[in-house]
Amino acid sequence: MQYNFDEIVEREGSNCQKYDNRKLIFGTDDVLPMWVADADFKTPPFIVDAVKQRAAHEVYGYPLRPDSFYNSIINWQQRRHSWAIERNWIEYSSNVVVGLASVVLSMTKPGDKIVVQPPVYFPFFHVVEGNKRLMVSNPLINEKGRYRIDFDDLQTKIDADTKMLILCNPHNPGGMVWTENELRKLGEICAKHNVLVVSDEIHSDLVFGGHKHIPFASLGDAFAQNSVTLMSASKTFNIAGLSSAYLVMPNKEWRSKYQRFMEATHLSSGNFFGVVATEAAYTHGDEWLGQLLSYLEGNLDFLMKYFAKNLPKVRVMKPEGTYLPWLDVSALRVDADTAYKLLIEAGVGLTPGKMFGIGGENFIRLNMACPRSVLAEGLSRIKKALADY
Ligand SMILES: Cc1ncc(COP(=O)(O)O)c(C=O)c1O
């Protein structure tokens, strides 16, 4: 079946963040929203059908996650990422960030040090600092337009109080799909110092040709035992509003800590629709995902050429995965704050890079998960805003 990613879907008025929260975020509703990381594409029909079928039952009492749900996760990870996981390693969370906060709360104590690698998805900062843990930054190094991990800095920053490192693989906002060598080196340093690696792999299915996502925990038993992986079908299949994520924890001790926390907080209930949507996605989603990835690569190619031709001062860090190109605006004659305001005035709403912490100050993040015609309109507004600078 051929899916149509060119279709424009009217989202305004559907109580979605991206469109219906523009006034609060940008001070105006009059911007083309290219900010929060969901897609303007329709959720695939096999998911919509599964949700409708469950909705048609008309009794929405307490849900149970059936074996078929867990099997769909196990089969997907094996099929897509050659990662063999066992049923009892999988735990539920309502979303990835709640899972991350739960891991921080259940596996560390106030005052413990947790390493993050900015510029990075900013809720990482909230779950560390908001829960009174000490955040240690191991900034990435921008080397010829690709970030690399500063292993020397990491080694010097880890001390006896450092208990955890939160990894973003693939990386938001840089778009790196970390290589086996990078992951191995990171894992070896962390294992040596008893630092648990918490790997957010929510973008793992959104990887472009020539790159391969490697689950951190798939590198071998020592890596698996010293890790917690956070996952969801939500980014890939555009079902963030259905609230369903999962964690993979091969290590029994860490898993017990998480289970005790979930018992104490009753956070594990969930909802029917997230469960059936995840199962449908992982059972029927391969063909749709193949077409989505081709479409996104087409968008990326279009965007790269557009900037090179029309706005070469804006340098795109070409993503290896994710649909969130990271735009370096440091060569403009205005600073990134001013550029961001000019963009709003020109009618396009992006995400300021400084939100992603150290190293993000000169960047702006763009969400290209939209029909190509919408992307073209957004890019022409960006050109209008910044061409004179
Ligand atoms: C790296 C990363 N983790 C987590 C999330 C959000 O996940 P959730 O909505 O399941 O909390 C995002 C969303 O952009 C993300 O980029």
Image: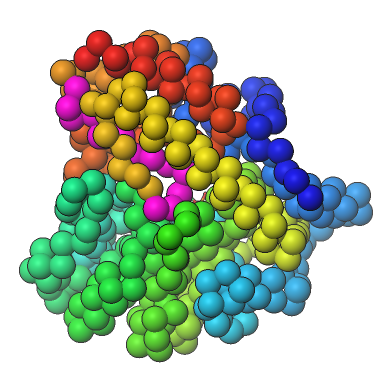
Q: Position of residue 2 (x, y in %)?
A: 75, 46
Split into 4 quadrants, where in the image is the C terminus? top left
Tell me which residue sits at (42%, 16%) in the image.
Answer: 381
Depicted 346 relative to depicted 174: above or below: above
State the predominant SS element of the stretch in magenta.
Answer: loop
Tell me which residue sits at (27%, 20%) in the image.
Answer: 339
Depicted 302 relative to depicted 21: above or below: below
Q: Position of residue 262 (x, y in %)?
A: 54, 69
Direction from residue 176 to residue 84 in the image, left or right:
right
**Which sits in the foreground, 212 or 197?**
212
Write down the region rendered in magenta: 320-332
Q: In the rendered image, which quarter is residue 200 located in?
A: bottom left
Is residue 30 in the magenta section?
Answer: no
Q: Does residue 99 appear anywhere in the picture?
A: no
Tell me which residue sits at (57%, 39%) in the image.
Answer: 39
Direction from residue 87 to residue 28 in the image, left or right:
left
Depicted 56 relative to depicted 219: above or below: above
Direction from residue 134 to residue 346 in the image, left or right:
right
